[in-house]
Amino acid sequence: MLTLEHMTMTEFKKHLGRTKTVVFPFGTVEEHGSHLPLYTDSLIIVEALKAVGQKRKFFLAPVLPYGVCTSTKDHPGTLSISAGTLRRIATDLVIEGYKKGLKNFLLVSGHGGSLHMSALKESAERLADVIGDLRIAVMNPYDLLWKELSELSETANDSHAGELETSMVLYLSPELVKGRADEEYPNFPRTVIVKDKVKRWPGGVWGDPRKATANKGRKAVALIADKITEVLGELEKRR
Ligand SMILES: [Zn+2]
């Protein structure tokens, strides 16, 4: 496990001889219902990455705990940043890593928001354009594992703070789960941007947290870890 934040510069130099891959995890400080911590997205992605790090050698950078939140941005506790800020941070971090000798970059997000993901993707596209021998991938497990994760959940339309996210926090840190919020879904129109988001989605839950179990959480985290491992394999394949 090559945890960047625990490493000395001497150790960094030594490990650079063995891997040129770094993973940057991205999370949020975002409401996750009345029952899950604001740190849920960061917790899940960092723990999944620790599992991957048991089997593969890569530098694991500290999580960026802030992300771009749209539907939840007005809910209590959410601290969102703008897409422009996220683009600049992601771009700066990759350039810094490249200057220090890293070549393969995985930006992996525990948050699947579309603006958040497009900011990361835009940064990656631009970096790949201007840095010749850089390899970069951007992912969030929910987009890539949509089918597998829906098979795991009993709720048909499970998402934010619902059955699976609750299951994963139950598995990873049960002491952080404060009861169970009720089943709920946002009531947003498909096109018009509404300003009364909290009124239309008071509980901030998308799915049914009452169906959560630690065992489903264990399976979901394992699926996520396997998918990240697969993406790393692809990223490190140089032609
Ligand atoms: Zn989440």
Image (cartoon, rainbow, N blue to C red):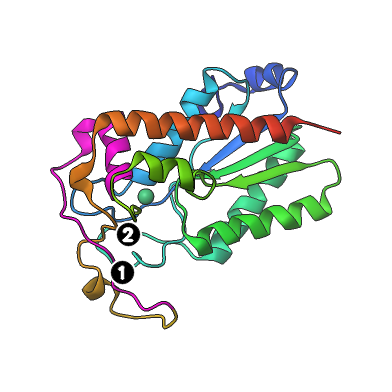
Instruction: Please state which of residues 96 and 2 is positioned toward the viewer in this rendering.
Output: 2
Residue 172 located within the stretch drawn in magenta = yes
Residue 236 located within the stretch drawn in magenta = no
- Which quadrant, please, contains the C terminus? top right
Confirm whether residue 148 shows in the render.
yes
Residue 10 in picture, x, y percent from top left: 66, 18
Residue 15 in picture, x, y percent from top left: 68, 18
Compute the Cα span from label 1 to label 2.
7 Å
The residue lying at 28 percent from left, 73 percent from top is 187
Q: Element under label 1?
A: loop
| Amino acid type for the residue under numbered disc 1 | Asp
Near mark 2 (Cα within 10 A), the count class, few <14, some 14-19 or many ≥20, is many
Up the image or down, 132 lies above or below 123; here it is above
The numbered mark at residue 74 is 1
Q: In the image, which residues are magenta? A: 162-190
Residue 199 in picture, x, y percent from top left: 22, 75
The residue lying at 46 percent from left, 59 percent from top is 113
Dot 2 corresponds to which residue?
Answer: 78
